[in-house]
Image (cartoon, rainbow, N blue to C red):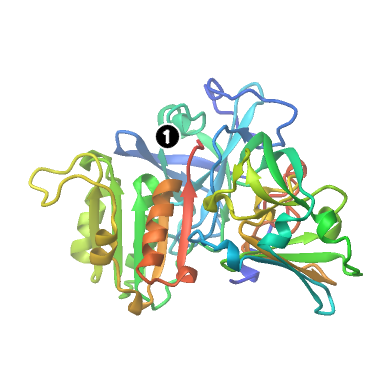
Amino acid sequence: MSIISPGFGGRRRSSRPDLPPGQYLTRDFPVLSAGPTPRIPLDRWQFTITDEVGKKHSWSWKEFQELPAEDVTVDIHCVTKWSKLGTTWRGVALDTLFENIETTADYTMVHGYGGYTTNVPLEDLLDGKAWVAYKFDGEDLAPEHGGPARLVVPHLYFWKSAKWVNGIEMLQQDEPGFWEEAGYHIYGDPWREQRYQGD
Amino acid sequence: MARAAVSRRLTWRAATVREARWETASARTLVLDVPDWPGHLPGQHVDVRLTAPDGYSAQRSYSIASSWTGDGDGVELTVQRVEDGEVSTYLDDGLEVGQQLELRGPVGGWFVWRNEPAPVLLVAGGSGVVPLMAMIRARGDVRGRQPFRLVYSVRTPEDVCFAGELARRVRDDPGLDVHYVYTRKTPDGWPAPAGRLTVATLNTHGWPPDFAPDVFVCGPTSFVETAADILVALGHDPKKIRTERFGGTS
């Protein structure tokens, strides 16, 4: 089914091959959050990976800063339809964080300060596909964009890139996180336009 | 959150414009007939898809302005025209009564009011009033007695959406209060100068944190950031503050 709107399309934005279906280009950096922006003092910041038997691996802010960092330039796609191309981030690859972690679990729940959660399969976090980023565009990551540090998983819709990230919990089975529970897609591939449950 | 309520596929539906009315010079309400509409909760939104004669299409999300009482197939969208916005300008200025568009929804299970007993504080910035209006209308439908307060920030009196209906509801819906904040120009005889929302505004016209109100804040990003920060500073539980931001998009 496709309904034609006569006269529509005169103001269209340029379509380009690097835009997933249903997305449009923005130069701004809009914000999507479910609640107030948490403010996290760096001396209390901590990032923890909890494996499936409950063993914890934690980093303080200082320890985290001492890990090898990478500069990446990636396109990001929000489920609210905006995409932003060529964004630059600095952060620690998840491969680095998982280096000494032995796990047989295939799924993860990512947690953020403020109580946000989102589920991501482990294979979508590894092999250079995801980072915990603390700089955007060369500057410290602003609180409203998830600072001091957020997950960046650019190949999935941006709600998977948890703001104010503080941990990853390993799961044997996939479980829905915050937006997934509220009707959004369990996986969220923008190129397959997996916005909502059942897409 | 109810998992069962959302475990259905969202398909595109044809919607027909039954009626259209201007709320302000730049915001128009579209009354849409949507056959077999499954119903919605106040605060939810829909995705709208427009297709040009050459096949080009664009999608945007819009909050639903109407409540849903279980009868009637349809939704009302109140669309604020965005400068240069390819979809909003068409919905406001190009679309005519009788014409069709595609939509799917309802979407969103978080920024919704479910007729809970707690007092409610609604904080609107500009066209962020739309989903909050759906909550006020839903409360009116069920003759709810929950104390409701709306703090509504607009640039000028001419920018107020739903002005007449809000005045009528303040008179007729027991326990509903509306406080306006004018940021650029006030009505004649208004007791305060034009200015932005402050700690004093929300301290005076919101609920005390001790009442544990459910708080809904909707508006442009910078407005929501400010309002939510003030509410947290006043002692409201961050988990009781639900936000919906828009900005830089059209």
Q: In this view, does B210 lie above or below A128?
A: below
Front residue (pair A14, A92): A92
Residue A82 sits above or below residue B68 on the image: above
Instruction: Give the quarter of the figure containing the N terminus of chain A.
Output: top right
Which residue occupies 64% across, 46% down? A135
Residue A6 position in % (x across, y down): 54, 23
- Asked whether residue A78 appears in the rendered view, the answer is no
Residue found at x 7% / y 47%? B189
Residue A168, placed above or below residue B73: below
Q: Where is residue A193 in the image (x, y as percent from the top left)?
A: 72, 44
Tag count = 1
Disc 1 crowd rating (10 Å Cα; few below 14, some 14-19, many 20+) is: few
Which residue corresponds to mark 1? B97
| Residue A156 picture location, percent across and down | 74, 48
The reply to whether residue A171 is visible in this rendering is yes
| Secondary element at image label 1 | loop
Q: Check disc 1 and give the amino acid type.
A: Val
Q: Residue at x 68, y 60 (%)?
A: A62
Circle 1 marks a residue in which chain?
A: B
Please give left or right for residue A90 compared with residue B38 in the image.
right
Q: Position of residue B192 (x, y in %)?
A: 14, 50
Q: In which quarter of the image is residue B168?
A: bottom left
Side (left or right) of A43 relative to A92:
left
Nearer the observer, A61 or B180: A61
